[in-house]
Amino acid sequence: MVLRVTRSIAALAAILAILYGSCEGSAFAQAPAGPLGDRPPITIKLGTEDVTVGADGSYTQISHYEITPSNDSVAKNLAQQAFAYSEAVDDLEVTEAYTQKSDGRKETVDPTHIFVQSPQGSAQAPMFDDVKRKVVVFPDVAANDTIVFTLTKHSKEVQFPGQFLYDSTYSRLVAWNEIRVTITVPKSLALVVESHDVTAEHQAAGGNIVYRWHYTAPVPLTEDVAAVAPVDRDPRFFASTFKDYDELGHAFAAMALPKAAVTKKIQSLADQTTSGITERRAQAQKLYEWVSTHIRYVGIELGQGRVVPHDAETVLANGYGDCKDHVVLFAALLKAKGIASEMVLINANNSYTLPDPPTLAQFNHLITWIPEFKLYVDTTAAVAPFGTLPFVEYGKPVVHALERGSTRHLMPLLAPGAATMSLKTVSQVTDDGGLHSQSVITATGPFSLLLRQVATSIEAAGPERAMKSILQQGGMTGTGDINFATAPSELGPSYSVNGHFEAEPQVPYTSGQGFAMPPGLRLLPFPGDLLIGRIFVRNLPSTEPTPCWSGSAIDDLSIEPPKGKHFAKVPADVSVTTENVTFTTHWAQTDRIISVRRELTSKFDQPLCSGALRKSMADIIPKIAAAYPTQISVADD
């Protein structure tokens, strides 16, 4: 059968990604922002999905959409649509496409204006050349016209034998006049379903069961600020023939585990990489570091194209792979040394829930569990120390790929003290109002992963160009340099970056005007940001859950005025304390130098700040954010 029917309706939500800065990736073109006025920029006049599923799980899906832009800017961007699919898994045909003009004329898309396109970068990853886009260019699209298209998709390859999965999510920012979804399945493939704010019904029809969903929301919200994924909170529904996640985990294991076979080449590499190392955890770490640094990661989400990974030796030979391939190669290398591991399905974005019907809606990534060391690891992070994960992977519900037994688990929370970062900057204002700054940034845990990722980007761009960009972001021009204590690929428990710059004169530094304390080389978030939620995001309701993590962050900044001047006033200290968070800002002056130390420490026993906990964070975040624009100024001696 089929892995998962493409969520055509859900993809429409991302048309508004640029308009509102929300939503996730889409197969549809994105429209530029424009005045909303009394009408939404895009209206989905009609969307229908009719899916017929065979007894073996194969399917035919007919998708029909009618979309109207309300202004010419949006119309220009809607005029070209690209629909993603996998040539290996599906046949996709554009069976109808035309522009319905507002005066009633119908302009059909020329067949030569429908073509297949390979995604950018596919030439560097030929193992994934089955992932394509069918592009449709609509003629003469203007405001108040309607683009109309019908797609027919036939499954070519059974991915989960005998199973069928489907899900759709509807953004509250989109005007949905009418959406209808119908799935017809044999009675032998009865679906487990779950709906949120979407009307659902089903009925028997001969030897089949017909499931129907209906959604309408013609008046969209103009703002919907949230910190968790649409699939966790927007109107949505899920359908699956898997009765539970154990079935899903067992089915994936049946397909994926044989790909981790230990061949002569795999055994040779494992032995060579761990030569002279007898301690088993050290062997696992060495193999992890080899895969992390030698196998290029191709970011294709689980569910795009084939769900079955390539075999380990193929991944090794090619030197690249997606998350499934990384996990398979690492599993084979561990197995070659007698170390067991498990493949783990996880969400690598900001989704934190699992619906009752087991689908891949919330699973877009794979990582590894090593039972012997009770350790989750992710080789695709490339520059994560062994046992360190990206922030977003802590506390998530996951499914382990096992041949038998319970597969559903919960990722551990980020332990207090594991994630730390500190920035120390010493600055001097020159006599002409220029600024000299020297900074050192040190990080551990997931913060060290973030810092290494920044360092990798700096290496790619070149330190001088990167420094120029950093100065421009601060409204300055000048020169400087950035240095790494070690290469980003050296995966020790902590990581440091240092740098200096000389910025050209700025009026506030000598004129007596107020200015904020210069942070120098800020490559990581402000203390207070990230760990308890984004402190500079406006309008996030206190009822909206926010990912939160235990950790600590410190700024230690100082500045010396030019000769003949002194700082007029020392700002007041700030102190914010709750059961979970302590934030302090302490100002001091010694001789002519003024300094500030900002420090935040957080401790949480859940991955999301929600309910009363979220309310307490919402209460203190404005107080923390207000500590940053604090002004200092110089005066003549």
Image (spheres, rainbow, N blue to C red):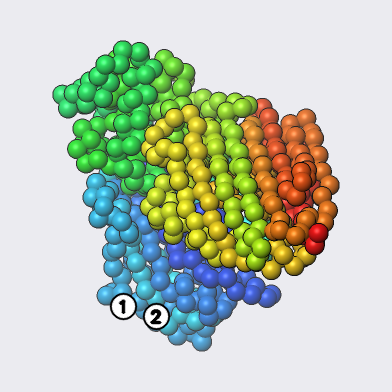
* Position in image of residue 461 (x %, y %): 40, 56
Task: Say which amino acid is labelled 2.
Answer: Pro
Instruction: Tell me the amino acid under the disc marked 1.
Output: Asp
Tag 2 residue: 139
**Can you give x and y, in whole percent of width and height, for residue 445 in the image?**
53, 32
Give the distance between the C-alpha atoms of the residues marked 2 and 1, in whole angstroms: 8 Å
Q: Quadrant of the C terminus?
A: bottom right
Furthest residue toward top: 278
Among numbered discs 2 and 1, the one appearing first in the sequence: 1
Label 1, on which residue? Answer: 110
Which of 2 and 56 lies nearest the eye of the viewer? 2
Name which quarter of the figure residue 292 lies in.
top left
Q: Position of residue 49 (x, y in %)?
A: 46, 56
Image: 54 above or below 472: above
Q: Is residue 259 above or below residue 173?
A: above
What residue is drawn where x is 70% and y is 38%? 599
- Do labels 2 and 1 touch, CB within 8 Å? yes
> Label 2 crowding class (10 Å Cα cut-off): few <14, some 14-19, many 20+?
many
Looking at the image, residue 486 sits to the left or right of residue 555; the answer is left
Q: Secondary structure at mark 2?
A: loop
